[in-house]
Amino acid sequence: MATIEDVARRAGVATSTVSYVISGKRAISAATRARVEQAIAELDYHPHAGARALASSRTDVLALVVPLRLDADTSLRGDVDVNVIMQFVAGVVPRARSLGYDVLLLTDDDPTALARVAGGSSADALVVMDVETEDARLPAIARSRTPAILIGMPVDPQGFSCVDFDFDGAGRLAVRHLAGLGHRRVALIGPPQVVLERHTSYADRMLHGLRAQSDASGVDLVLTHTSARRDAVAAAVSRALDGDTPATALVVHNEAALPTVMDLLRERSLRVPEDLSVLAVCPPHIAEQQSVVLTSIDIPAQQIGATAAEMAVATLRGELEPETRLVRAALTDRGSSSAPPARATS
Amino acid sequence: MATIEDVARRAGVATSTVSYVISGKRAISAATRARVEQAIAELDYHPHAGARALASSRTDVLALVVPLRLDADTSLRGDVDVNVIMQFVAGVVPRARSLGYDVLLLTDDDPTALARVAGGSSADALVVMDVETEDARLPAIARSRTPAILIGMPVDPQGFSCVDFDFDGAGRLAVRHLAGLGHRRVALIGPPQVVLERHTSYADRMLHGLRAQSDASGVDLVLTHTSARRDAVAAAVSRALDGDTPATALVVHNEAALPTVMDLLRERSLRVPEDLSVLAVCPPHIAEQQSVVLTSIDIPAQQIGATAAEMAVATLRGELEPETRLVRAALTDRGSSSAPPARATS
DNA sequence: GCGCTTCGACGAAGCGCTTCGACAATGACC
DNA sequence: GGTCATTGTCGAAGCGCTTCGTCGAAGCGC
């Protein structure tokens, strides 16, 4: 591999000049710059990342910590959807690239990784996915003095910037949308209890939004939680629909259970949206793939990822004070919600 | 951050001694080792990755190139399932870690990435996903003289090792399984035409396996290909089931279309497996999430990933000559296949 | 034409680590 | 008791780059 010295020799300049041509940190005459650039091209020169990191104490690398804990049966953990993770990664990587950073992928099942990467200056900053309300990793990260962006909303962000989905806004939006169509009784088919326990924050915020808007709009709210198991889903659906005053709209915030919900509705001969409105909170491709294409509120994972990458770089550039950003909820109407059936409007 | 010199001073030894304690490349007395290790612990010392890379010309990093080309509408490309990519990543990362390597994540939508990483010695080896039959990236990789493991089977591997799923074996296994149950007419609901064009190799190999075993077992084969669009899926299903001699079993090698296939079967009031056997080629969680839990042949993406990581490291250690490994197909019986209905057995 | 600033390029000192050769100290052997 | 390996440690030379201080040359005003 060609070194900066080869380039300098070929261009007839000092190595420092080559360095300045590349970094643009000092003025270089047009003629010299041209010669150097030509030499770089001719030699197909690429600066040695390690040497650069050593000399400049910057790596131009972002470390991304994703939840990849594997279950015994080799399938991924159920409560964090892999699609969402991937969307998220797909948001971080290209944005980081466009800002001049590569991405080092770490999994949170490796407790040594953070220390190694932060302590060993393998990355300039961390982006940590899936940060829990009380996250055990934060103190160690804080100690490493490495800038970090957290995805999620810990109780104590310890001075880090955070990005997250505006679950509160999503809850409000869902109810506002349905109330606007005339619904007066809405049921939530929520995420399983495990998720609730690990992510108090996001489930809480969603509930808070749902409740607040329900109160404001005069809507009755039925709350259910379920795993993806058919019997559990059936029980939740039953709670929603089999009471004296059945819900006229379902808000499904549980991707895994979604196909089963749709299945059960068909078994009950309920047409969507004529007999029952359904609103999903999930990625768009999931909403589109159901037996009835669903109106949904997206979790804009990709945008959150991109935002996190941006914030990380801004922080490194000293352009950003720690702050928390919530990415807004947006509803895509795909026709699975409409006015409630006449007999239920009363 | 503490440096190796701080450690050396504290332990009362030379920096080289510290280095040898860490690398184990020379004999060190137990007493000295203990002192050094204590100093390392006390100072929470982590070697500087860049300095190490510079001095040793090794980074202990694997670069992983994943297909993340984004569609205009921000959803991921349809023909490579994100779940499979993620499974794959989930195979590579932990295995790489356990072998002492971190993973740098590159996307194949960034044409400069490979040159930058390979040329700039940011990684010791590449693992390239989704390599096509005629892959335009290979010459550049070969030129960079960076060891690489390819996922896929290019016509000309250019001296690189390859790993891939044994699609031929999967095809044979599918037909053998169904033929063993008594089926004499089997239909394939295959991947969309686009995929076929990009991945001649894998579709071909699957077809080859299906055909070979069909011939051997005396089974009639109906081949269809479809996108996930409902009308297209309906057409494919119709081709399979509406002829004079309808197929008694479906092999579905098209995850996106799977829910729709199941839906159509229900519309036709076909019970699975009593009236029709269904065998899916897809990740297990997909098979389990259908309206009828499906017998399936897994694409063991995670295992392929782990294998790729292993091969990469083995190659770096000089323990592996270029070779192609096929990861075997395995069938998980979940009860969606059985003997064909009596009237069709004749 | 003199001193002044400004511009562009240079040289050298590290950044923190690995690795090689050198070399005491120790023990084995005759 | 002298020779010869062996073992354990040290010192120093880089690895390829950035960056700071320096300095000649050119341009300016007077």
Image (tube, coloured by chain):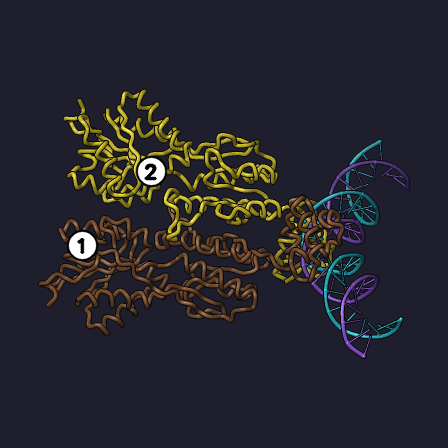
Chain colours: A brown, B yellow, C cyan, D purple
Q: Quadrant of residue A21?
A: bottom right
Q: Can residue B28 be seen?
A: yes
Q: Give x and y (percent) for residue B87.
A: 41, 45
Judged from the image, the secondary structure of the residue bearing numbered disc 1 is loop
The number of callouts visible is: 2
Residue B190 percent coordinates (x, y): 31, 35
Image quadrant holding the N terminus of chain A, namely: top right
Chain letter behind tag 1 = A
Residue to which mark 2 is pinned: B192
Q: What is the chain identity of the residue bearing mark 2?
A: B
Residue at 17% x, 41% y is B267
Above or below, A49 against B182 in this view is below
Vertical relation: A146 (above or below) B115: below
CA neighbours of label 2 inside 10 A, class few (<14), some (14 to 19), many (20+): many
**Residue A272, label in figure:** 1
Whether residue B98 sits left or right of residue B282 in the image: it is right
